[in-house]
Image (cartoon, rainbow, N blue to C red):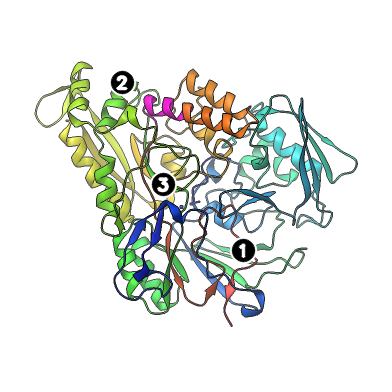
Amino acid sequence: MNRKLLGALAVAALVATACGGGNSGGGTLKSDASAAGHNDINPQPSDKIKQGGILQWPLDALSDNWNFWQADGNTQGTPVMINAMLPWLFVAKADNTLELNKDYLVSADLVSTSPQVVEYKINPKAKWSNGRAISWEDFQALWKDCNGKDTAFQCNSTTGLENIGDVQRGADDQDVKVTFAKPFGEWQSLFSPLIPKELGVSADEFNKGWVDGPKITAGPFTIGKIDLTAKTVAEVPDPAWWGQKPHLDQILFKVVGRDALPDALASGAIDFYAIGSNVNLYQRAKALSGVTIRQSTESQYNLLDFNGSEGSALHDQATRVAVEQGVDTQAIAKALLGPISADPTPLGNHFFVKGSKSYQDNSAPIKFDAEAAKKKLDELGWKQNGAFRAKDGKELALNYVVDAGNPTSTAVFNLVQAQMKAIGVDAKLNSVPVAELFSNYVNRGAYDVVLYRFVAQAQPLSSNASTFYYTPGNTQSNYSAIGNDTINKLLDEAGAELDETKRTDLIQQADTEIWKEGHILPTYQVPGAYAVRDTLANFGAFGFAVNPVDYVDIGFLK
């Protein structure tokens, strides 16, 4: 898909004083790419884990739409909740590679390259919660829903699916033949999560049918209760699940404010929280009894999204680039991560993170240079008169949207506002409820600048190409409506390249062009650090193995 936000994820490892033994005294998070390829989840065999228990999982907000393929379903809370209930055909491993998920597939093979044909053989035990066997028709339905031909289906991405020419029944209903009209190298990422064909019976059902909750599932867990008043979602083991049975009796997702997380963990109201780049959350975690800080390199980074849509303050590419040159991402990384991480540096790539084998810094076109930014703005006619610049009687002011109650977002805003003022740009705070950030602002392009988190996955085109591919009138996940034909062409060529080395080179070329265009501005990779209850096993810092996490193995020690 596209932005696996998870909400949806820094290259860091705990120094000796903060690892292993947990939270006792001192220690900082240390930038260290060698941490990649590992995770820190307190791995335990089944005989050490008790049967039962409730995992209490904090979220910023509940889902706006449980259909993860629909535009409003692509939010931070949706993946972690829906992934326990829907099929992922391949799962990410800690070393950032993909592995066949045998709960759903017997095999998945590239059986021809000219034309490209992939054959999936579905596990005959795999069934939807309505009793219907998972079949080739579910693959065909998702392809038809999100191949881009019928824009009434508001898909968050068509990447890869638009390359397919046909999806047919093979030898039986559990044999799927996918023939590509145009090659697609990252084919292992397609059809995950798989949704039931019933969801695509019409555009209206696809777009709105799962707003209140998923109607059909096929995973180790299913919906127990959704309580919008209490802002909780209870998921319980599905008795019809054909795979290994979960240890937990329930996963209870609950909305908890960022500032309240340490007290909630201390009181037993939650069982972990993500530290991210929040100094207070880190310091509090070190002081909590019965809690260990777990950490692994993850693929998440914080970013500033600048809106370039028609009519926005930054629609003009030259103006947008000049403004972005006035943002000092090194200062932001140091201010946010400096107190908890050694030598923090900004991220210089949109597709690959530090710690992945393909990372390289392509950010040269928008390196911080306040003097150059001011000179460019002068040349573009944005003349400074007093504190801020104006052109044709209109001040260069930016609607900077911040999710209220998120101290990280507020801290970054304060830094960026000061940096913008230094080049004569007025960044105006627009504080909005966290539950509305994506549904009412990001997804609608109702901002000039906004901060949120992004995930760069093992197959980056499948997850993120739709963020940077620009088609007027059908922006998918390109919320800021920025792009050009050069970027589109390079992304298309990369997608059609079956050779990984050549595909990676094309992605790097596209990334360089994205920087030139003044698109999303990565700020820093987020430390994959979590405060986790000591008794919680097979859970914590999953590293690159986040899509999806193994919900079945999670449990509490005996």
Residue at image mark 3: 301
474 up-or-down from 57: above or below? above
Name the secondary structure under disc 3: strand
Mark positioned earlier in the residue sequence (1 or 3): 3
Tell me how far mark 1 sits from mark 3, CA to CA: 24 Å
Question: Disc 1, disc 3: CB below 8 Å?
Answer: no
Q: Residues within 10 Å of mark 3 (few under 14, many from 20)?
A: many
Q: Position of residue 340 (x, y in %)?
A: 30, 60
Q: In the image, what residue type sits under mark 3? A: Tyr
Tell me how far mark 3 sits from mark 2, CA to CA: 25 Å
Name the secondary structure under disc 1: loop
**199 magenta-colored:** no
Residue occupying the point 53% across, 27% down: 506
Residue at image mark 2: 318
Residue 476 seen in this snapshot: no
Q: In the image, what residue type sits under mark 2? A: Ala
549 up-or-down from 510: above or below? below
Question: Disc 3, disc 2: CB below 8 Å?
Answer: no
298 up-or-down from 156: above or below? below
Q: In the depicted view, which residue is nearer to us: 139 or 111?
A: 111
Question: Quarter-wise, where is residue 12 in the image?
Answer: bottom left
Q: Position of residue 512 (x, y in %)?
A: 42, 27
Q: Position of residue 314 (x, y in %)?
A: 32, 26
Residue 461 seen in this snapshot: yes
Q: In the image, what residue type sits under mark 1? A: Tyr
Please identify the dominant SS of the magenta region. helix
Residue at image mark 1: 551
Q: Residues within 10 Å of mark 1 (few under 14, many from 20)?
A: many
